[in-house]
């Protein structure tokens, strides 16, 4: 006879809260968990812990149907969504038992994939389980380590069309090694072969079960302070237990019975202690909050990877970058840096950042006082200038000498020891103990919210390609030291907040001290316009929702329609398609709409007590040229008040200097589109609208000093964009334009100098930021050939948007 051993894991999932960010349909909603069964899994059993339902009564006021297991899926409580930004406490517990196929190596790590589905039903019929319709789903990957307990939590966002979030806590552990006797075949009939395999099964079973038991015991001891109970646990001595068990196995006359008896005893012990652990921490909200904070820190640490920042004085913005960005990029690709990036404990490929698809960002900051921003923190203490967490610091005085050898050497040295995935359960006590004493941690929402409880409120409309942002007062903190960048991130969520996609860990506030997030006493506001003439409303909504989710904390950032409905909010969004053909005429019409709307909003602001109103613009492609043209024409139409309120301009792959110095196939493509579509905008961007270059639209626009009328100018561009050259989108001098001594080359350099001088000589402009980005293009070859793939990837990649705004860009808008 031979023995087969099967790993049996128990995965306990708590659905904590459901948060409606922007669900368009009002009605009944459910969240369902559906485990995926692979070829490695022998059986999956799911059950619902109904003890919580009995404690809360037969039916809560906001729950229509109780949690249940329906057709092999775990179904949460049914909730009725009526308003935006509603939060529902679910507290549903489900237990998934997973048994894998037999194996000799019982210490092999496994994984379990679970489909998290969002279902909807209208409220005009009685709710029934079979009447719900699946709207969208996410797939999460839970690690199953036989030698340790995995305890983690996360917030999971659904896609932008059904923007909502669910927070969950997960505990997974090996709870049993199921043994089964089988008749030995001819190859296993000899006693030596049988003894060798039996010993291997016994050793791996003892190693997995004993180490997993100790891991649970250590977790209980480390976090017992979070529960109001006296806990006494004797930590298992694994080494002595292993030695004693091997001696017992070697001296046994019936090794098969010894294996079955010992494995059954260990399995019973670990199952009992695992159940006791769940009972002990089941009602502990403090543990859930700490696990969420650990997840936030993990996620932010991943986003800090492949993000480098350099800072220089603003008068250096017209000088070429001393460190070649392309050299950095090539070195990163050669050492397989991206593939070695760690993952979050509970991983979701759609919302998290897979290493091989991680966007790479180089940020060049040109500011009025770069030294003070880099060297001093709020306590007037000197700080180092950090760079990406796993890569060496990028210094402004670095030269190319031995650069490749240096970056490869440092990369291998710093990356290799960090490849192991972070484990919340093993590092939680260190987070809890060190949270209060960490002077360089990111401030939580409770610390950065103003005393009157003001948060950040953003508005968007249903008009295509336009969204608006309306934050109330916000105290901007100074830069804090972090493992990867010196720019301060947005305020992190408080311990009771699980909806910010990415936020640093911080101390939980005391109970009962939570402040309101949006106050009626808000005295300032800011409005962000998102303009992309080549994109539809759904595309811009995806960007807006990704931005909102990336910087939100307990609904700190939210998008809603205007108080009078979308019809009252027009301005640039109604005219952006026309602006691409006849710029001045329709910009005037847009200004008339803006003036009328501003008059109505001014009255509302006076009634609400607003003292100021700022305008920020976020534009893609031709939208950046439209914004600069509009701002430049504003004084001519008696709208100087709008220019005085311009705050931040962000452009993404915008042809500020036209479509010059593009590859030949792109040049002929532009000429074909201009001829076929009779496109006036293509004619202007290719400098074919005038015989004299100095009379062209792009040249005149570069002289209107529009960039210098903003406090912050953020330029996003990628060298992979063939349609809009990076020297045009980033306003960076290039060798190609410098070597062109023709009349057009002189005009091009004059445009470049005019744009940069308007920023450098402006009393209002404080910061110019260039984001040089690299993306992993997954589009078709046709889109790569035409240049569209790299041109629009910044809007389609929600991970890039979340990374950009969480780590750096958001501070320029608030």
Image: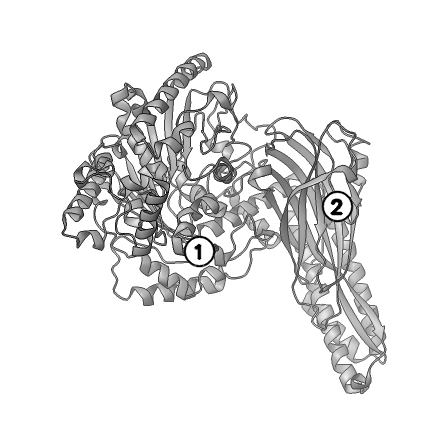
Residue 391, placed above or below residue 282: below
Q: Which quadrant is the N terminus positioned in?
A: bottom right
Inspect this view and state whether residue 265 appears: yes
Residue shown at 44% from the left, 48% from the top: 793
Residue 295, placed above or below residue 708: below
Q: Residues within 10 Å of mark 1 (few under 14, many from 20)?
A: few
Q: How far across and down, in percent of the image, does residue 432 sit?
A: 57, 45
Question: The residue tagged with tag 1: helix, strand or loop?
Answer: helix
Question: The residue tagged with tag 2: helix, strand or loop?
Answer: strand
Q: How far across and down, in percent of the image, does residue 425 sit?
A: 62, 52
Where does label 2 land, which residue? Answer: 74
| The disc label shown at residue 782, or none | 1
Inspect this view and state whether residue 650 appears: no
- Which sits in the foreground, 387 or 639? 639
Residue shown at 51% from the left, 30% from the top: 559
Residue shown at 39% from the left, 53% from the top: 786
């Amino acid at each position: 006879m031979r023995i087969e051993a099967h790993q049996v894991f128990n995965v306990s999932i708590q659905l904590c809260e459901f948060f409606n960010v922007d669900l368009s349909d009002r009605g009944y909603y459910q969240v369902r968990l559906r485990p995926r069964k692979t070829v490695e899994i022998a059986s999956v059993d799911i059950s619902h812990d109904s003890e919580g339902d009995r404690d809360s009564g037969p039916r809560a006021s906001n729950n229509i149907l109780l949690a249940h297991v329906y057709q092999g899926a775990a179904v949460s409580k049914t909730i009725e969504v009526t308003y935006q930004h509603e939060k529902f406490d679910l507290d549903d517990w489900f237990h998934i038992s997973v048994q894998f196929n037999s194996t000799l190596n019982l210490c092999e790590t496994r994984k379990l994939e679970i489909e998290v589905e969002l279902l909807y039903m209208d409220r005009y019929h009685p709710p029934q389980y079979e009447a719900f319709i699946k709207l969208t789903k996410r797939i999460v990957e839970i690690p199953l380590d036989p030698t340790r307990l995995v305890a983690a939590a996360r917030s999971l966002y659904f896609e932008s069309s059904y923007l909502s979030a669910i927070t969950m806590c997960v505990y997974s552990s090996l709870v049993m090694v199921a043994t089964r006797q089988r008749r030995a075949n001819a190859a296993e009939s000899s006693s030596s072969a049988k003894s060798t395999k039996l010993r291997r099964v016994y050793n791996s079973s003892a190693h997995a079960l004993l180490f997993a038991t100790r891991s649970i015991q250590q977790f209980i001891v480390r976090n017992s302070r979070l529960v109001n109970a006296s806990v006494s646990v004797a930590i298992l001595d694994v080494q002595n237990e292993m030695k004693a068990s091997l001696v017992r196995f070697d001296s046994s006359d019936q090794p098969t019975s010894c294996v079955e008896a010992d494995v059954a005893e260990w399995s019973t012990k670990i199952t009992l202690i695992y159940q006791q652990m769940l009972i002990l921490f089941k009602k502990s909200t403090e543990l859930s909050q700490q696990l969420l904070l650990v997840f936030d820190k993990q996620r932010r640490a991943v986003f800090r990877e492949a993000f480098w920042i350099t800072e220089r004085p603003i008068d250096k913005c017209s000088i070429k970058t001393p460190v070649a960005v392309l050299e950095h990029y090539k070195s990163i690709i050669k050492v397989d840096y991206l593939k070695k990036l760690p993952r979050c404990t509970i991983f979701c490929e759609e919302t998290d950042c897979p290493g091989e698809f991680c966007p790479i960002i180089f940020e060049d900051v040109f500011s009025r006082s770069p030294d003070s921003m880099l060297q001093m923190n709020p306590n007037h203490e000197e700080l180092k200038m950090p760079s990406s967490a796993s890569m060496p610091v990028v210094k402004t005085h670095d030269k190319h000498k031995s650069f490749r050898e240096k970056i490869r050497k440092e990369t291998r040295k710093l990356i290799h020891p960090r490849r192991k995935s972070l484990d919340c359960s093993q590092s939680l006590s260190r987070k809890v103990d060190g949270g209060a004493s960490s002077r360089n941690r990111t401030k939580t929402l409770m610390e950065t919210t103003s005393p009157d409880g003001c948060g950040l409120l953003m508005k968007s409309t249903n008009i295509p390609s336009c969204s608006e942002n309306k934050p109330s007062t916000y105290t901007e903190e100074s830069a804090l030291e972090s493992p990867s960048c010196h720019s301060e991130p947005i305020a992190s969520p408080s311990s009771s907040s699980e909806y910010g996609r990415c936020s640093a860990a911080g101390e939980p506030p005391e109970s009962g001290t939570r402040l309101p997030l949006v106050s009626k006493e808000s005295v300032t506001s800011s409005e962000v316009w998102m303009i992309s003439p080549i994109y539809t409303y759904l595309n811009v909504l995806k960007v807006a929702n990704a931005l909102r989710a990336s910087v939100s904390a307990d609904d700190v950032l939210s998008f809603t329609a205007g108080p009078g409905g979308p019809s009252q909010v027009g301005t640039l969004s109604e005219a952006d398609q026309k602006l691409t053909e006849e710029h001045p005429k329709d910009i005037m019409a847009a200004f008339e709409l803006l003036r009328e709307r501003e008059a109505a909003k001014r009255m509302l602001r006076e009634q609400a007590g607003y003292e100021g109103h700022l305008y920020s613009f976020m534009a893609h492609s031709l939208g950046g040229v439209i914004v600069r043209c509009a701002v430049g024409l504003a004084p001519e139409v008696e709208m100087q008040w709008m220019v005085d309120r311009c705050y931040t301009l962000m452009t993404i792959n915008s042809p500020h200097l036209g479509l010059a110095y593009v590859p030949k196939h792109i040049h002929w493509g532009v000429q074909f589109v201009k001829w076929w579509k009779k496109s006036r905008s293509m004619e202007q961007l290719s400098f074919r609208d005038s015989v004299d270059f100095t009379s062209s639209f792009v040249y005149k626009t570069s002289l209107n000093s529009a960039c210098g009328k903003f406090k912050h100018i953020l330029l996003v561009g990628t060298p992979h964009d063939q349609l809009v050259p990076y020297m045009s989108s980033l306003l960076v001098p290039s060798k190609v334009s410098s070597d062109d001594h023709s009349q057009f080359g002189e005009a091009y350099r004059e445009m470049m100098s005019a744009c940069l001088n308007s920023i450098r000589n402006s009393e209002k402009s404080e910061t110019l930021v260039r984001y040089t980005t690299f993306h992993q293009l997954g589009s078709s070859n046709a889109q790569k050939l035409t240049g569209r793939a790299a041109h629009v990837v910044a809007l389609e990649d929600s991970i890039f948007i979340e990374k950009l705004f969480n780590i750096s860009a958001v501070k320029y808008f608030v």
